[in-house]
Image (tube, coloured by chain):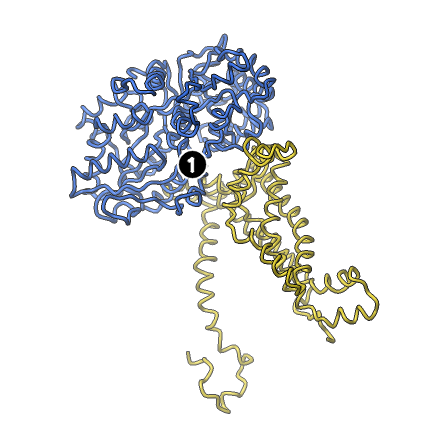
Chain colours: A blue, B yellow
Amino acid sequence: MDPQSQHRPTATRRAILGMAAGLPLIGGLAACGSSGPGTSASGSASGGSGGGNGTGASFWTLSGKPQEDIRQQAVDAFNKANPDTPIKITLFQNDAYKQKVKTALGAGQAPTILWGWGGGGLKSWVDAGQVDDLTDFFAENSALKDKIFPSSFGAATVDDKVYALPCETVTPIVLFYNKKVLEKVGVQPPQSWQEILDIVPKINAAGVAPFSLGGQSRWTNMMWLEFLYDRIGGPEVFQAVFDGEKDAWSNPDSIQALTEMQKLIKMNGFVKGFASITADSNADQALLYTGKAAMMLHGAWTYGGMKNDGGDFVSGGNLGYMNFPAYDGGKGDPSDSVGNPAQYLSISSKASEEEKASAKKFLAESQFTDEILQAWIDSGNIPVAQGSDSLIGSGEDADWLKFQYDTAANAKSFAQSWDQALPPTQAEVLLDNIAKLFQLSISPQQFASNLNAVIGK
Amino acid sequence: MTAGAPVVPSAASRTPRRGGGTGGLWWLVLPALAFFVTFGVVPLLGVFGLSFASWNGIGAITFGGLDAWRTVLADPGLLHSIFVTFEIMVISWAVQTPASILLGTFLAGFQRYRGVLAVLYVLPLLLSSAALAVTWKALLDPNFGLGAGLGIPLLSQNWLGEGGLAVAVVIFIVSWQFVPFHALIYQGGVRQIPRSLYEAAEIDGAGRVRQFFSITLPQLKYTIITSSTLMVVGSLTFFDLIFVLTAGGPGDATRVLAVEMYQTGFLGNQMGPASAIAVIIVLSGLVIAQLLRRLGGRDASASQLEGM
């Protein structure tokens, strides 16, 4: 994924979300027996302590297989090499983590190393003076910097300073389809938006839902708009919003994208009851692999879940995937993609000098070792390291991995998830209005005026 | 401690003191008062203070004057949340109260099978709201839930995906969960009604229905007020069930005040407006509780057993 033109910092967040079973607040109840941190510190069972008050650096990150195993592997390897300054890792469930970090930062109890999604969230940490500027760190470790996809630095950068290490994986959002179902209905995978509108009635007539959607999670609906905006108006439309231009949502291309969106909803393009389905429970993936839905627009991270839970769905070659189709007459490039360019590690400003030194060492040494890169590939992900396609090999997932790599690498624009790019206050209004748009309870014009009201906030 | 009751009663200590004899025991309230002030009043004042501040949750807290209140009061979302909150409050009260009274009266009997049933009825009370919400959500899933599993189309409604239905489902689950609790309260209330009232009524030829309406219900007046206060004030703070079940959705159909507060504060990072919503919740609760007390009549301590 060499020179990708990245327009905004992209955040990666849901890499885990797809994998983490259970609902945000309830993860604990479901299985783990605790909604608090699940600690698996090396040699210490008492983790979860805040930074700045313990010995050695602490590291908060997300739980969920297989990612947590690789994170643990990186920490274990580091601790083995640095037995005097071990890193304490604490794992949290996705949505619980967001609140937990916010509370910990507000209370001055943050860990030394913070895992994050970059973008607007990172900016809010930076604005509050909670994380350290790592620009000098990258100057000192230029070999490390050169190893990482340049496109992933956008979401780590605030006011031309880098505040986080891009690491882990790049995950584009792609259009999945169930080959068997499309065959049974007798239609080809859609090559344009107009074809989507053509085949939806046929799929419905066959008693199958055209698209699966976990609409209660809201950002799932947002992925559709991200692509429609890009294909119809190009990346500039959302860029104007991001830049805080007045009335940017009222752009005619914006209104057209919203209108097309509601057109698809009105013709029952989405599975019945989509507004009550959460992505966290993976019910949306289940709809696709059980053949109750024909297609699904989702993050590449769902591949692992479908492979694990879908029986022979993936191994039997029934899962098809493609980039989001073009819009006839649209301004956007059909190679454009949306997704998460990387995950990010930042260092707390409140940590002691010793802890910071240990944390920097961890950032520099632990994330891009051959073992870790291979582990990400083996888990079905593309690490954010240059030339990682050479590690793909010829395993059963090779085609999928190559497709992911190419989608990310060939994208003229690799846009960031909107809710991650925007500051939290704007993002919440956006998600709220997207939910209403999908309920058809507001019109495209109302959507635009509701969101114009919070531009720049 | 000098005001404490003397260990050895003496004639002198029995002389009534000024203050009616209990005035000296004021310190007994200290533990409860300290607890209440620390965990009730202080946070409340904090929230009240925050509602005049501008804070994103992690940065510095700055004074924002009435900004937060202006934001909140000008937001059509607040009116909607208030409407949804009261809608759920009123309907779930109207569903729960008759059901609880009937069930409570039934359980007040001393027959053994009623005792067994009473134990079964309280089962939903033993489960946490979050667990209930997850379970119901799975059962009501239109694609993988009860309806799809059993092949009964009637049960395969879009229960949580349509505004009106979602509100109805929330009310149903709330009632299902809390009716047993209120039934227990009414059971206690009914058992306290003296037998002699019913015996007298029987002699006068009153049937069971007449006895229920003329004796049981009036005698339960204060139990009804207690139970209603718990229901109504409790429904102001519904959060866990709704958050897990619908997250306030679809759209904003089930977004009650508590969910609105959470989304404003913890997702939107606007602690000022979120605190203002919290203050609104507290004030509504106080006003409603006070109104319900008034309903009980001026002299709430009057006995209903006069002449017994």
Q: Residues within 10 Å of mark 1 (few under 14, many from 20)?
A: many
Where residue B275 sits: x, y (%)?
A: 48, 46
Would you place residue A35 above or below residue A248 in this image? below
**Circle 1 is placed at which residue position?**
A21
Where residue A376 sits: x, y (%)?
A: 29, 27
Helix, strand or loop at mark 1? loop
Across the whole image, how many numbered discs are drawn on residues? 1
Residue appearing at x 47%, y 82% in the figure: B5
Q: Looking at this view, is A118 or A252 the one in front?
A: A118
Q: Residue furthest top?
A: A329
Q: Quadrant of residue B184?
A: bottom right
Residue A301 seen in the figure = yes
Location of the C terminus of chain B (image quadrant): bottom right
Where residue A450 sits: x, y (%)?
A: 54, 28
Q: Looking at this view, is B17 or B230 the one in front?
A: B230
Q: Quadrant of residue B225?
A: bottom right
Would you place residue A66 above or below residue A254 in this image? below
Q: Residue furthest right?
A: B205
Q: Looking at this view, is B161 or B279 the one in front?
A: B161
Would you place residue A406 above or below residue B268 in this image? above
Amino acid on which disc 1 is placed:
Ala
Location of the N terminus of chain B (image quadrant): bottom left
Residue appearing at x 36%, y 40% in the figure: A92
Residue A5 seen in the figure = no
Residue appearing at x 18%, y 39% in the figure: A80
Q: Is residue A334 left or right of residue A378?
A: right
Q: Which chain is home to disc 1?
A: A
Q: Looking at this view, is A188 or A94 the one in front?
A: A188
Where residue B296 sits: x, y (%)?
A: 68, 62
